[in-house]
Amino acid sequence: MRVVIAGSGRLGSGLATVLSKDGNDVAVVDRPMDRRRLGASFDGLTIEGTPIDQEVLERAGLRKAELFVAATSDDNVNAAAVQAAKGFFHVPRAIARFMDPERAVFYKKLGVDAVCPTTTGLNQILDFIRTGDFSSLETIVDPDIICVRPRLEWMGMSPINLAMPSDRRVIGLVRGETVYGRDEGQTIRQSDSLLIARRGR
């Protein structure tokens, strides 16, 4: 898979290193380029340039890429880059990192896949404060299965009736310490969580 990553900081370099070791064709675009973080073992392409410059993205091979990741330290650059990747270069899959939670929500509403480490960290700290305990799972997380809190418009609905993206399906409902199958007759409550899997699982 050809992957183009905007940003050579901790996140961008970490992703580039792992994806390259997995056998993917990886290109990293940034200015300035932090080759020290990428390390001597990184055998992908590095392009010194602004990640929102069309010519720079062309040189990185974005037109043939299957995945684009906007992971610079600037939310504005990430927003512009991911929109260019989707709208101009027609990359099938693109995701952006936003430090501002409100901006992440805004772009998600526009159909941009977004991740916000600020929100993730906030939730983990609140969990520690509320429960008095925090433990990191020493295991491999399966990215094909996620657990999400339900939206307000899902309240009272059956998990089996929820509209999901074409590549996802609801497989269960978690209530307290009990896991129910999607077709066990439960209706969604505010305190529930939903298990969502990638189709084919």
Image (cartoon, rainbow, N blue to C red):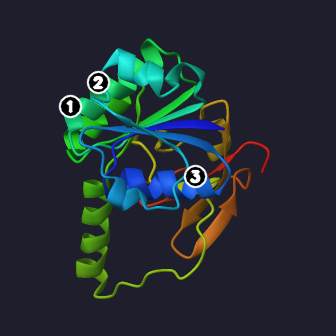
Mark 1 surroundings within 10 Å by alpha-carbon count, few (fewer than 14), some (14 through 19), many (20 or more):
few
User: Is 111 in front, or is 189?
Assistant: 111
Q: Position of residue 110 (x, y in %)?
A: 36, 23
Residue kind at label 1, given as amino acid type? Asn
Disc 3 designates what residue?
Answer: 19
Counting residues from the N terminus, which is met first, the one under dot 3 or under dot 1? 3
Residue 80 badge: 2
Is residue 129 found left or right of 160 in the rendered image? left
The answer to whether the residue labelled 1 contacts the one labelled 2, judged by CB atoms less than 8 Å apart, is yes
Relative to 144, residue 98 above or below: above
Residue 106 visible in the snapshot: no
Which is nearer the eye, 145 or 48?
Answer: 48
Q: Position of residue 44 (x, y in %)?
A: 54, 45
Tell me the SS state at disc 2.
helix
Q: Which residue is identified by label 1?
A: 76
Identify residue type, mark 3: Leu
Q: Residue furthest front?
A: 40
Which picture quadrant has residue 190?
Answer: bottom left
The reply to whether residue 93 is in sight is yes
